[in-house]
Image (cartoon, helix red, strand yellow):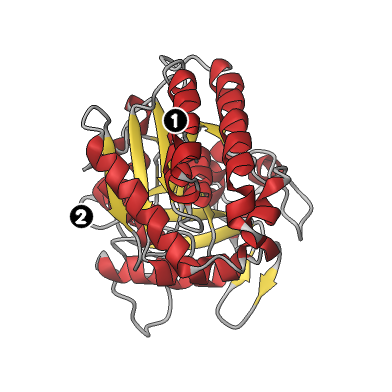
């Protein structure tokens, strides 16, 4: 997983329904750029530098995998979509929406199109007041003062009025916590761990991850599948059972939202593909005894990717022992999952085809996955 950028953005509007424009802008930021971590209150301030109606101002903190320059381009697209009419005239003008990057975790940026921190923020109380609410101790990397200190020392004495109206966080409509226990499943290289990380971080979920790297049989299995299939599957079953018991046992499934990138039932899927008939019968008896004692997820999400895409992902993540996995093996795993899922009418299962999606690099694909998940 890439390390996300944390970016503070200033919002302003002084045309028509100002609060509505602020709300639409935040929704567009969430849908197209990244997670909205914090939202300030809305403040009313006089137009700065020109005569016009008062502005509604706010600030948000977002977490995104895009660079700050990419974020700027996307903010300009959002402004255009909300009717921002930029002209070549000098000076300031009334606007439906104004979106500016104030701070970035990338630090100081000076290019022809972007300067961060915003070069005039210390002189604008309509930026500092809402920013101080969500970033009090944020240090200006050039001026070496916190936002709180900048607010105390600013020469801008314009009147600032905090409003009762608020901007709602767009992610609140994705009530994933009602699922309580979400398991994300998929073939090798489908992206289940990456998606589990994203959902856990964005929705403050308890994260339960499979720890496969310690299994001594896995590299041997990919060298000689027939010889090492049974010890591999038995060791995986025992490990998954024990870890789920330990991990899930730490949480109150009625209070906590838990997301996992595996479930013990995947052991049965792989065993059906890798084991001989007599080995599988023995394995199934042990599996049934273990599985009935484990808590079951409120929702299984199965990420389907075609075999060609799976092979690309496996190659990209570069685990040496996975590079020799044959396409036929991945085909069998996919078919095994789908066959098992169709036979489990009592389970709440959602299958999503993400073969043409990239929810890590493309924020809109991630939002698409969330919408599919809750549809």
Q: Residue at x 42, y 72 (%)?
A: 308
Q: CA distance from mark 1 to mark 2?
A: 66 Å
Q: Residue furthest right?
A: 144
Q: Which percent across, then down, holds residue 120? A: 60, 63
Q: Nearer the viewer, residue 106 or 149?
A: 106
Q: Which percent across, then down, holds residue 347? A: 27, 30
Vertical order, 1 against 246 (above or below): below
Give the residue number, with chain letter if any, for mark 2: 16
Residue 181 got which mark?
A: none
| Residue 282 located left or right of residue 136 | left
Please indicate, yes or no, whether residue 162 appears anywhere in the rendered image: yes
Residue 284 got which mark?
A: 1
Q: Which percent across, then down, holds residue 235? A: 63, 35
| Residue 368 located left or right of residue 67 | left
Q: Quadrant of residue 346?
A: top left
Vertical order, 119 against 162 (above or below): below
Q: Which percent across, then down, holds residue 312? A: 50, 72
Q: Nearer the viewer, residue 15 or 268?
A: 268
Single out the mark in the foreground, 1 or 2: 1
Q: Residue at x 28, y 74 (%)?
A: 85
Q: Quadrant of the N terminus?
A: bottom right
Residue at disc 1, secondary structure: helix
Q: Residue at x 64, y 49 (%)?
A: 228
The tally of labels here is 2
Q: Residue at x 23, y 41 (%)?
A: 342
Vertical order, 302 against 1 (above or below): above
Please indicate, yes or no, whether residue 54 appears anywhere in the rendered image: no
- Mark 2: give few (<14), some (14-19) or many (20+) Cα within 10 Å: few
Which circle's residue, 1 or 2, is located before the other in the chain? Answer: 2
Residue at disc 2, secondary structure: loop
Q: Quadrant of the C terminus?
A: top left
């Amino acid at each position: 997983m890439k390390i996300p950028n944390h970016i503070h953005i200033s919002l302003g509007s002084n045309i028509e329904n100002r609060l509505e424009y602020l709300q639409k802008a935040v929704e567009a930021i969430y849908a197209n750029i990244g997670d909205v971590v914090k939202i300030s209150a809305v403040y009313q301030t006089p137009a700065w530098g020109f005569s016009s109606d008062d502005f509604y101002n706010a600030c948000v903190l977002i977490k995104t995998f895009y660079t700050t320059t990419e974020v700027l381009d996307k903010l300009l697209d959002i402004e255009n979509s909300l009717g921002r009419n930029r002209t070549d005239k000098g000076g300031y003008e009334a606007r439906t929406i104004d979106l500016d990057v104030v701070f970035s975790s990338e630090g100081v940026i000076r290019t022809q199109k972007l300067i961060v921190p915003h070069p005039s923020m210390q002189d604008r109380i309509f930026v500092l007041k809402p920013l101080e609410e969500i970033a009090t101790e944020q240090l200006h990397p050039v001026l070496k003062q916190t936002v709180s200190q900048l607010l105390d020392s600013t020469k801008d004495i314009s009147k600032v009025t905090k409003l009762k109206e608020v901007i709602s966080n767009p992610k609140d409509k994705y009530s994933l916590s009602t699922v309580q226990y979400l398991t994300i499943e998929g073939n090798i290289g489908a992206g289940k761990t990456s998606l589990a990380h994203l959902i856990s971080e964005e929705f403050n979920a308890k994260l339960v991850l499979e720890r496969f790297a310690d299994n001594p049989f896995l590299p041997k299995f990919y060298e000689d599948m027939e010889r090492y299939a049974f010890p591999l599957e038995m060791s995986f079953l025992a490990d998954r059972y024990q870890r789920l018991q330990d991990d899930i046992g730490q949480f109150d499934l009625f209070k906590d939202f838990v997301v996992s990138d595996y479930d013990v039932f995947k052991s049965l899927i792989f065993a059906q593909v890798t084991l001989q008939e007599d080995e599988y019968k023995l394995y199934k008896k042990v599996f049934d005894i273990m599985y009935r004692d484990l808590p079951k997820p409120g929702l299984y999400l199965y990420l389907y990717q075609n075999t060609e895409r799976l092979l690309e992902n496996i190659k990209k993540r570069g685990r040496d022992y996975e590079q020799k996995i044959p396409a036929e093996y991945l085909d069998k795993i996919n078919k095994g999952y789908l066959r098992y899922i169709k036979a489990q009418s009592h389970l709440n299962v959602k299958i999503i085809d993400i073969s043409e999606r990239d929810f890590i690099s493309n924020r809109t694909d991630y939002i698409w996955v969330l919408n599919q998940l809750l549809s």
